């Protein structure tokens, strides 16, 4: 009997189609992150965008739906319609707070969001209030070291979203050091930066999942296609 040989190659075969060739891809280095299991699905790459065209045409594991205006249920509904991956929905925490944040959080859960995100100014009372009405994880955003991490975890925060700009990696290290005895495997999401090196530094600092932006992707892709159409049209004449 001949010996059966198994294919142990690590290369991942790829399937796509002609009409979906311009998919927005997450930086490959993000695959080095450990990921976060969210309701049984491992999340490593999280796209930070409110562009529904990008959301419908990307390969990210999740969407970070956070924006600088008061959370709007119609916007969340639009994102829910086009997204094929989990949505981490922003529900305020600064100007939008208290009962309003809790109400938007409840709507987010009903609309299919798998986590809610509160911004840095969120009070402990608002965190507790949101926790009373939602059954999905609360993610709290950290922008500097002027927060009591233990207090927020005790209030119901289930993960941290670290957005410290150029100091993000150092901020992650600080968070890990502060909670290593209290919550050593606490989930951390963080903005990765613009280069593969910066993203890897963020992962090495202790981030489990990485957010990446898609600024101008729709416009750049459309511009490229229009230039191609112009060249094709000129050849036909």
Image: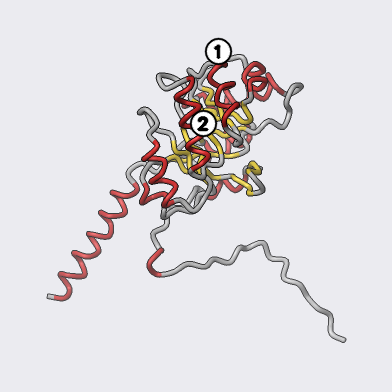
Q: How many marks?
A: 2
Q: Which residue is mark 1?
A: 146
- Occupied quadrant, residue 9: bottom right
Q: Is residue 145 above or below residue 184?
A: above
Of badges 2 and 1, the one in the foreground is: 2
CA neighbours of label 2 inside 10 A, class few (<14), some (14 to 19), many (20+): many
Q: Position of residue 119 (x, y in %)?
A: 48, 24
CA neighbours of label 1 inside 10 A, class few (<14), some (14 to 19), many (20+): few
Q: Which residue is mark 2?
A: 117
SS for dot 1: loop
| 2 and 1 marks in contact (CB < 8 Å) | no
Dot placed on the residue nearer the N-terminal end, 2 or 1: 2
Q: Is residue 105 above or below residue 78?
A: above
- The extreme right residue here reads 1
- Quadrant in the picture for the C terminus: bottom left
- From the viewer's side, name the closer residue of 52 and 211: 52
- The extreme left residue here reads 237
């Amino acid at each position: 009997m001949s010996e059966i040989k198994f294919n142990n190659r690590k290369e991942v075969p790829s399937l796509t189609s002609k009409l979906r060739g311009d998919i927005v891809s997450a930086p490959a280095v993000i695959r080095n992150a450990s990921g976060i299991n969210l309701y049984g699905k491992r999340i490593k790459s999280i796209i930070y965008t409110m562009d529904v065209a990008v959301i419908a045409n990307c390969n990210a594991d999740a969407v970070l739906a956070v924006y600088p205006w008061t959370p709007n249920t119609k916007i969340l509904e639009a994102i829910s319609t086009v997204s094929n991956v989990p949505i981490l929905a922003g529900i305020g925490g600064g100007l939008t707070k208290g009962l309003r944040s809790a109400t938007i959080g409840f709507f987010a859960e009903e609309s299919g969001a798998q986590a809610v995100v509160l911004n840095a100014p969120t009070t402990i009372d608002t965190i507790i209030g949101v926790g009373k009405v939602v059954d999905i994880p609360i993610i709290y955003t950290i922008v500097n070291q002027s927060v009591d991490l233990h207090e927020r975890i005790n209030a119901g925060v289930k993960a941290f979203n670290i957005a410290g700009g150029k100091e993000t990696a150092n901020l992650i290290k600080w968070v890990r050091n502060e909670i290593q005895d209290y919550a050593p495997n606490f989930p951390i999401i963080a903005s990765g930066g613009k280069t593969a090196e910066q993203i890897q530094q963020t992962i090495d600092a202790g981030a489990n999942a990485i957010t990446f932006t898609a600024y101008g992707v729709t416009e750049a892709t459309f511009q490229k296609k229009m230039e191609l159409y112009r060249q094709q049209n000129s050849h036909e004449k």
